[in-house]
Image: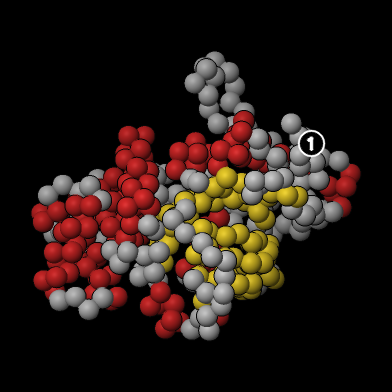
């Protein structure tokens, strides 16, 4: 059943909750988050490891493990992904929504040549002949900056460099011209030069092919480089949402402020790097009040008892903090 969502929005997530059932009980990983992804936008999902970023991405792809419990709505172009049958989601996955995983050496099939892996996506979702698919794969490999694609087509993943493997993963993701691409830490294992090339490639894909991108990272420097807006996650909650430059010019949640203070500066030689004290709560921890309260330098008594609601700060900027608008 198709639903109406806001014009200009390709993905609308509402009250998304994800928990995992174990022998010791149910443990929440994502605690009722809501956000929109605009058409042709690049939205950053940022936070430390364990905040729920990758789990959220897997929920959108409907790739959660069997012990996951999912509620809320994920509307993609008017269709609720949460309620889709497996056959429907298979048709959607790889064609209209695709995902680039963090480590291509583990996400690519080591037994298949890389050209075949791109071809398989076209074979599953198009009616092209074998010859048409081969020519399309070669063109796609060239589009993502791979030299001599006819030769590389017949290589196995382990025969390629890390940067080349990531370009193959991107080629698989864009093969069917999806409307939405989820990139989960796609530059983490790459050196700085290759990182910059991959970021530029993703920006080119966004601009030239019109694909919206959810870019997941813990690196605020990369987020600023590529994203048009940012959602900050902490302990399964969204805590701040804003256009990128608005967020960097005036963060209004203590967690966001802490993450930005931890970005290394050019003039920081000889100084101790900042680190937010404490650690992200485990999903097995019972949370009361604001989940960031134990680590927050601005916390007061109310924070221990009550979970803040989002406070609108204007210009599409929202923060989930009692002191939002008063921190600077």
Q: Position of residue 245 (x, y in %)?
A: 56, 38
Asked if one can make out residue 278 in the rendered structure from this viewpoint, the answer is no
Specify the farthest residue to the front: 7
Q: Position of residue 101 (x, y in %)?
A: 40, 56
Q: Which residue is mark 1?
A: 326
> What's the residue at 61%, 33% (across, down)?
249
In front: 233, or 244? 244
> What's the residue at 53%, 44% (across, down)?
218
Horizontal side of 238 relative to 308 (left or right) equals left
Q: Position of residue 227 (x, y in %)?
A: 48, 45
Q: Quick check: 132 above or below 101?
A: below
In front: 175, or 39? 39
- Tally of numbered tags: 1
**Quadrant housing residue 30:** bottom right
- Quadrant that contains the C terminus: top right
Q: Residues within 10 Å of mark 1 (few under 14, many from 20)?
A: few
> What's the residue at 40%, 64% (across, down)?
179
Q: Position of residue 156 (x, y in %)?
A: 19, 57
Q: Quick check: 2 above or below 138?
A: below
Horizontal side of 1 relative to 193 (left or right) equals right
Horizontal side of 138 relative to 313 (left or right) equals left
Q: Quick check: 134 above or below 307?
A: below
Name the element at disc 1: loop
Asked if one can make out residue 126 in the rendered structure from this viewpoint, the answer is yes
């Amino acid at each position: 059943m198709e639903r109406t969502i806001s014009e200009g929005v390709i993905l609308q997530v509402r009250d998304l909750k994800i928990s995992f059932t174990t022998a010791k009980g149910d443990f929440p990983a994502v605690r009722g988050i809501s956000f929109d992804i605009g058409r042709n936008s690049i939205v950053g999902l940022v936070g430390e490891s364990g905040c729920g970023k990758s789990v959220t991405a897997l929920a959108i792809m409907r790739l959660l493990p069997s012990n996951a419990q999912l509620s809320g709505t994920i509307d993609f172009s008017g269709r609720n992904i949460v309620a889709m049958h497996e056959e429907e989601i298979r048709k959607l996955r790889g064609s209209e929504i695709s995902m680039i995983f963090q480590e291509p050496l583990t996400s690519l099939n080591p037994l298949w040549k890389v050209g075949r892996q791109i071809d398989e996506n076209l074979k599953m979702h198009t009616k092209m002949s074998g010859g048409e698919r081969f020519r399309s794969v070669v063109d796609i490999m060239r589009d993502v900056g791979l030299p001599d694609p006819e030769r590389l087509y017949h290589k196995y993943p382990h025969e390629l460099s890390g940067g080349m493997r990531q370009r193959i993963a991107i080629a698989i993701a864009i093969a069917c011209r999806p409307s939405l691409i989820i990139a989960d830490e796609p530059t983490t294992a790459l050196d700085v030069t290759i990182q910059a090339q991959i970021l530029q490639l993703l920006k080119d894909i966004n601009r030239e092919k019109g694909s919206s991108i959810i870019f997941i990272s813990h690196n605020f420097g990369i987020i600023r480089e590529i994203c048009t807006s940012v959602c900050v996650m902490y302990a399964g909650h969204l805590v701040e949402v804003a256009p990128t430059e608005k967020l960097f010019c005036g963060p209004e949640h203590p967690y966001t402020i802490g993450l930005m203070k931890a970005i290394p500066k050019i003039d920081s030689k000889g100084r101790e790097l900042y680190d937010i004290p404490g650690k992200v709560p485990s999903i097995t921890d019972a949370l009361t009040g604001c989940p960031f309260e134990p680590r927050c330098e601005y916390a007061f008594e109310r924070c221990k008892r009550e979970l803040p609601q989002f406070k609108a700060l204007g210009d599409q900027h929202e923060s989930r903090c009692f002191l939002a608008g008063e921190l600077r």
